Image (cartoon, rainbow, N blue to C red):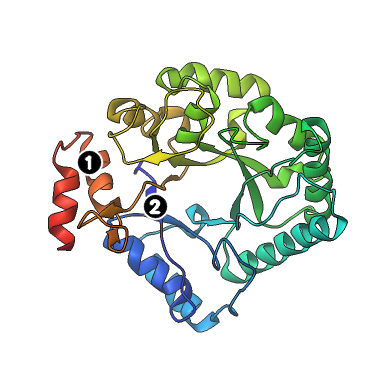
Amino acid sequence: MKLIIGSHVSFTKEEGLLGSVKESLSYDENTFMFYTGAPQNTFRAPINQEKTKEAKELMEKEQIDIKNIIIHAPYIINLANDKDEDKFNFAVNFLKQEIKRAESLGIDKIVLHPGSHVGVGEEKGLENISKGLDLVLDKKEGPIICLETMAGKGTELGKTFEELNTIIKNVKNNQRLMVCLDTCHLNDAGYDVTKFDELLDEFEKIIGIEKIGCIHINDSKNEKGAHKDRHENIGIGTIGFENLINIIYNERLKKVPKILETPYISIDGGKDRTYPPYKFEIEMIRNKKFNEKFLESIRNYYK
């Protein structure tokens, strides 16, 4: 079976989904992930259905299965904290809007950070997430929400399989819930991703492998258990190239889309000019061979 590999791409007001497909193809990908608007704010431009139609035609031509495309919900959604009822209701309603946008685009999966309890406590925070998801997933059918495994930075929830299972089992329509594994987050949360089959065995016992909806492939700047969530380029961080290859090509997850969220590369040492590494990282992944000079190759390519 063909490797399902892609990256985070842009989604602009002008080009919409069509621009996302074009960018993904420029990196030699067969899937991708995007935000339907800026992840830090609430502004959302109307979906351009003409561009969406063109995007679907291009995906069909290039043999990109729309069922493998992922939307990432914005960071501003936090279902874990209900201290402020208005903010909690905003999070629920905004997530409902994102689901409607996914439906209008024909996308089946939305990745969501479970949330941070911000002082209400872990138990109450997990209850709040389930309560919020119950309000959002009020129908038996519709797009699936993939709860992302988190690094445990600050008061983040979803840092263990047990926490995710607690959320899932307390949601009525939990057939519409899956999990997004993030390799950097797993490492930073304290899981040993170098023994990935053992990690999957644990996941199988607690949640069930059939609940894995997608995987974010990222190296990490941090040692295992650091709880910091700092992504690194493939093969540059503490997880390492061979370990990531073993995860990407694991037979038990061959039907699961893999998405890169690795850092953009600076060309001149500053932050004003940074460029996506995905074309080069995906080439290494397909070849299963690490290129020691791939960062240099990226800089030369974009100069």
Residue bearing the label numbered 1? 284
* Residue 229 visible to the viewer: yes
Question: Residue 93, image x and y in percent?
Answer: 77, 63
Name the amino acid, label 2: Ser
Left or right, residue 41 beside residue 163: left
Question: Residue 191, image x and y in percent?
Answer: 52, 22
Left or right, residue 296 beside residue 222: left
Left or right, residue 128 beside residue 116: right
Residue bearing the label numbered 2? 7
Give the secondary structure at mark 1: helix
Question: Residue 176, image x and y in percent?
Answer: 71, 47
Q: Nearer the viewer, residue 152 or 253?
A: 152
Q: Is residue 194 above or below residue 244?
A: above
Q: Please report contact status of discs 2 and 1: CB closer than 8 Å, yes or no.
A: no
At x 75%, y 49%, the residue is 79
Seen as rendered, the residue at the extreme front is: 270
Going from N to C along the chain, the mark reached first, 2 or 1, is 2
At x 39%, y 66%, the residue is 21
Question: Residue 32, image x and y in percent?
Answer: 43, 56
Name the amino acid, label 1: Met
In the picture, which quadrant includes the N terminus? top left
Give the secondary structure at mark 2: strand
